[in-house]
Image (cartoon, rainbow, N blue to C red):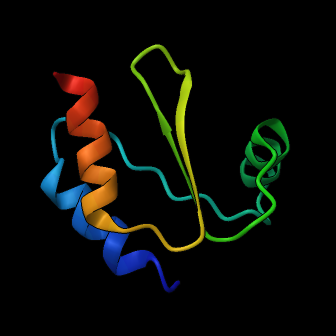
Amino acid sequence: MIAEPIVNGFKEEMAGMVDVVHLNLLSAAGREVSGRYGVKIVPASLLFNSQGELIKRVNGVPRKDDLLGHVRGREE
């Protein structure tokens, strides 16, 4: 997965503050989530707040700094 090093870096930097979940879109859970949130591009990153609401969608390979900035901006 081309985005794996970026996502793993984000996961390490935000350890204890956010949960990072990888889904295989061919699995039952992956199909359900992709259908629910209209995932049409892979990779896709979906960021949710603590209430489970979608707050950010990144289609394509994410930039770690963008993910970090968005999450940190929500914490303020």
- x, y percentage for residue 1? 53, 84
Q: Residue at x 60, y 58 (%)?
A: 23
- x, y percentage for residue 36? 81, 36
Q: Residue at x 49, y 86 (%)?
A: 2
The residue nearer to you, when weighing 23 against 6, is 6
Q: Residue at x 24, y 33 (%)?
A: 73
Position of 43 relative to 22 (above/below): below
Q: Residue furthest top?
A: 51
Q: Residue at x 69, y 71 (%)?
A: 42
- x, y percentage for residue 70? 32, 42
Task: Quadrant for the C terminus, please.
Answer: top left
Residue 4 falls left or right of residue 34? left
The residue nearer to you, when weighing 19 against 46, is 46
Answer with the quarter of the image where residue 43 lies.
Answer: bottom right
Residue 66 falls left or right of residue 49? left
Q: Residue furthest bottom?
A: 2
Answer with the quarter of the image where residue 65 lies.
Answer: bottom left
